[in-house]
Image (spheres, rainbow, N blue to C red):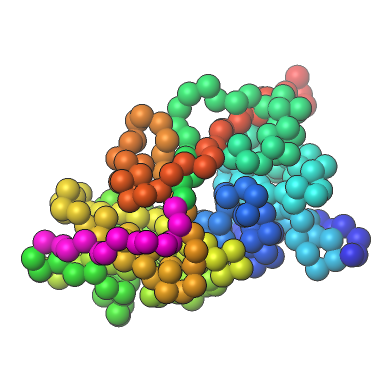
């Protein structure tokens, strides 16, 4: 192996190297699937100044990375064989952030938990958190029938791409996913169009979707994101399209699927859906907040 090096970037420039570490860490952590990183890359498009990153490499291999969404929301991943790098990532993030840091880590990342607690970060006692759910891809149920006139299929043209982006904005009340960003994401590894399925309404137009990502090395598919237009909920659309993506994962050679859902009582519906589809919890996240730094003028 070569010498350890750190490189800093405006935005997630070294995405493939970061995903390489995600592939390596996923079997033990079950968190930060490669699809998560591409999805977050999509949300960071044209916002490079707000999303600084740093990556640590040993030779040609990524061993740690940090990714800020300013002012202070940190994603990080560290090879458990190099736990001391967690402090280096946090040093970098604390210098770069515009205020106190928050970091969400999984219980299956004890080296990150230890570093945060050692540095005086405080774990949130309540509030939102994510539960990581998984299920095998054996013995999958049939894809449920949809109401008359609704169909599940892959996106076919620019109108579908724009409709998929619009359905996401409606489902989540978000403005970040535009047709242009979604189109650029479709050209980014490991995107596969047969795993990004939509539900089309009788009158035309995308009204629900499940975007799937597949990690071939770990034979694991992930849902990220899943959404239904508010005007078409409670029709079984999400269950049908998610089940179709499970079958697509299996056809790709997958053995397991995962999804992250809110675990707190404030947003229970997605978790209930996934649990009813045979997903079970295997870990959860905790959010840590760093101590407020004193001004150098005080």
What residue is rendered at 62% in x and 54% in y? 26
Residue 42 in view, yes or no: no
Quadrant into which the C terminus falls:
top right
Q: Residue furthest top?
A: 298
Q: Is residue 200 above or below residue 71?
A: below
Q: Position of residue 62 (x, y in %)?
A: 75, 60
Residue 288 occupies quadrant? top right
- Span colored in magenta: 135-147
**Magenta region, main secondary structure:** loop
Determine whether, in the image, residue 203 is placed left or right of residue 266.
left
Q: Position of residue 103 (x, y in %)?
A: 61, 38
Determine whether, in the image, residue 218 is placed left or right of residue 156.
right
Residue 243 among those drawn in magenta: no
What residue is rendered at 25% in x and 64% in y? 143
What residue is rendered at 60% in x and 26% in y? 123
What residue is rendered at 45% in x and 27% in y? 127
> What number of labels is visible?
0
Determine whether, in the image, residue 143 is placed left or right of residue 73.
left
Quadrant into which the N terminus falls:
bottom right
The one of 13 and 19 positioned closer to us in this rendering: 19
Residue 243 occupies quadrant? bottom left
Residue 146 among those drawn in magenta: yes
Residue 54 occupies quadrant? bottom right
């Amino acid at each position: 192996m070569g010498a350890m090096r750190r490189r800093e970037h405006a935005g997630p420039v070294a995405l493939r190297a970061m995903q390489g570490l995600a592939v390596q860490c996923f079997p033990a952590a079950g968190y930060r699937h490669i699809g998560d990183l591409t999805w977050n890359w999509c949300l960071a498009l044209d916002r490079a100044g707000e999303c600084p990153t740093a990556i640590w490499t040993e030779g040609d291999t990524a061993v740690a990375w940090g990714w800020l969404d300013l002012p202070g929301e940190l994603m990080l991943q560290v090879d458990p064989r190099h736990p001391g790098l967690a402090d280096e990532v946090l040093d970098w993030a604390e210098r770069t952030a515009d205020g106190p840091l928050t970091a969400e880590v999984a219980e299956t990342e004890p080296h990150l938990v230890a570093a945060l607690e050692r540095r005086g970060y405080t774990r949130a006692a309540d509030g939102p958190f994510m539960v990581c759910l998984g299920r095998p891809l054996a013995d999958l149920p049939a894809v449920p029938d949809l109401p008359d006139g609704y169909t599940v299929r892959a996106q076919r043209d620019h109108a579908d791409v724009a409709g998929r982006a619009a359905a996401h904005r409606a489902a989540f009340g978000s403005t970040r996913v535009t047709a242009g960003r979604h189109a650029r994401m479709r050209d980014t590894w490991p995107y596969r169009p047969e795993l990004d399925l939509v539900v089309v309404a009788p009158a035309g137009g995308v009204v629900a979707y499940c975007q799937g990502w597949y990690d071939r090395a770990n034979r694991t598919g992930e849902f990220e994101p899943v959404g239904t237009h508010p005007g078409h909920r409670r029709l079984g659309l999400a269950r049908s399209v998610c089940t179709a993506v499970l079958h697509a994962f299996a056809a790709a050679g997958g053995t397991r699927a995962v999804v992250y859902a809110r675990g707190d009582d404030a947003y229970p519906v997605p978790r209930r859906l996934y649990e009813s589809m045979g997903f079970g919890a295997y870990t959860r996240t905790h959010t840590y907040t760093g101590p407020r730094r004193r001004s150098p003028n005080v």
